[in-house]
Image (cartoon, rainbow, N blue to C red):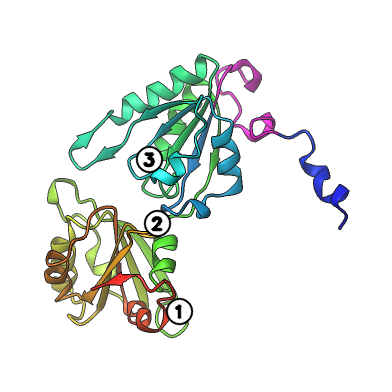
Amino acid sequence: MSQQQDDAPRKGMTPWSAPERFAPNPVTDNPNDSPGEVALVGAGPGDPELLTLKAWRLIQSAEVVLYDRLVSPEILALIPENAERIHVGKQRSNHTLPQDQINLRLVELAQAGRKVVRLKGGDPFIFGRGGEEIETLAEAGVRFQVVPGITAASGCAAYAGIPLTHRDHAQSVRFVTGHLKNDTCNLPWSDFVQNNQTLVFYMGLVGLPIICRELARHGMKPDMPVALVSKGTTPDQKVVVGTLSTIVDRVEKSDVQPPTLVIIGDVVSLRNRLDWMGTNGA
């Protein structure tokens, strides 16, 4: 293909120049009546080279960026110096801004005519509350688009040398939030205890003892392989490996910090041969 042919589809394009890609305005039925725009962008699991090309283009042209705690410093460094930065990160029992105020802020900025990037770690539609945010934008008649990112399960598992599915070990995978509200266990634990299945718990560090206890109580074998990945895909990545009966003790003896991802299943045993990163392990 010639260079001219390759460049033709991109000629004259900017990240914000395709209004047909935005959701229609439910209030006015005319997306051009909304002066500002919001791009809900997934920043991936941490490694800036895992950022999508579209995400990079939108970040580079943003006027305002609202970002979460899980967005890595290397990705924040890509934000233009003249763009306004607003930290809206949340962590357990410590929210910089409540979710409803974040939603309102997005609407206010867009209605003021700003090009806004809402930057979230991982993928905004996987335990990222992105759906709630664009529901608010749609109700307010604000134009928006969604840019998916590599979710932590995919990125962290790959960088830890753990395939989430494998013909000989797992034909299905479940993504589960490990952030147990008020330490409750209202999850379908018996459904999680199945052969040939991988479980991935997001934000599972604090709830790890409960997770292991409930899985054991519902019949999971005590020697089921388990891995905890801390700060996955970053230079500080650390992987702690054990079994359902030993992982809690091993994690307590290790210096691991959030964000973490817990992978449970026979596929974890493949890490011994597939750890291409050679990352710190315990």
Q: Residue at x 17, y 55 (%)?
A: 206
Q: Secondary structure at mark 3?
A: loop
Q: Main secondary structure of the magenta part?
A: loop
Q: Secondary structure at mark 1?
A: loop
62 relative to 69, above or below: above
User: Is 31 a magenta residue?
Assistant: yes
| Residue indicated by mark 2 | 152
User: What percent of the width, then of the height, locates residue 233?
Assistant: 40, 60
Amino acid type indicated by mark 2: Ala
User: What percent of the width, then of the height, locates residue 96?
Assistant: 26, 30
Query: Which of marks 3 and 2 precedes in the sequence?
Result: 3
* Residues at discs 2 and 1 in contact (Cβ within 8 Å): no
Q: Quadrant of residue 16?
A: top right
Q: Residue at x 54, y 29 (%)?
A: 62
Q: CA distance from mark 2 to mark 1?
A: 19 Å
In the displayed structure image, the side of residue 46 where residue 95 appears, left or right: left
| Residue indicated by mark 1 | 166
Q: Magenta region: which residues? A: 14-37
User: Is 199 a magenta residue?
Assistant: no
In the displayed structure image, the side of residue 138 where residue 228 appears, left or right: left
| Residue indicated by mark 3 | 129
The local crowd at label 3, few if under 14, some if 14 to 19, many if 20 or more residues have their Cα within 10 Å, is few
